[in-house]
Image (tube, rainbow, N blue to C red):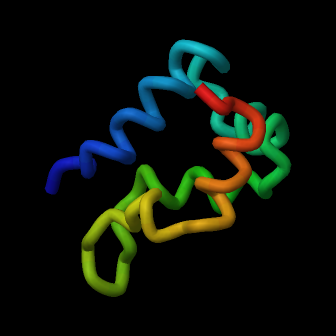
């Protein structure tokens, strides 16, 4: 199973800006670490990656901190 493109774009951003530190990124946007890391692991119930696009709280936090 491959990582959805929107999740991959977020992961690439975290790699560039936070040297891959998902916890630091989560703290920077004001959400808890597990909320971010779950986007990069398949859900064990259905083996599908949760989509960043289906998490309005995370999208809002990202756009508030990084409007570009």
Question: What residue is at 26 percent from the left and 43 percent from the top?
Answer: 5
Residue 38, relative to residue 16: is it above or below? below
Residue 31, relative to residue 15: is it above or below? below
Q: Nearer the viewer, residue 63 or 28?
A: 63
Residue 48, relative to residue 59: is it above or below? below
Direction from residue 66 to residue 5 in the image, left or right: left
Quadrant hosting residue 27: top right
Q: Nearer the viewer, residue 30 or 43?
A: 30
Residue situated furthest left in the rendering: 1
Question: What residue is at 67 percent from the left and 55 percent from the top?
Answer: 60
In percent of width and height, residue 19 lies at 61, 15
In percent of width and height, residue 57 lies at 68, 65
Q: Nearer the viewer, residue 6 or 32?
A: 6
Question: What residue is at 59 percent from the left and 67 percent from the top?
Answer: 56
Residue situated furthest front in the rendering: 68
Q: Quadrant of the C terminus?
A: top right
Residue 17, relative to residue 22: is it above or below? above
Question: What residue is at 66 percent from the left and 28 percent from the top?
Answer: 21
The mark tally for this picture is: 0
Quadrant hosting residue 14: top right
Q: Quadrant of the N terminus?
A: bottom left
In percent of width and height, residue 41 lies at 40, 57
Direction from residue 66 to residue 16 in the image, left or right: left
């Amino acid at each position: 199973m491959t990582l959805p493109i929107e999740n991959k774009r977020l992961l690439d951003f975290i790699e560039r800006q936070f040297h891959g530190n998902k916890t630091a990124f989560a703290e920077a946007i004001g959400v808890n670490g597990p909320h971010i890391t779950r986007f990069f692991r398949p859900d064990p119930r259905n083996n599908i990656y949760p989509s960043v696009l289906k998490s309005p709280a995370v999208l809002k936090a990202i756009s508030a901190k990084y409007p570009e």
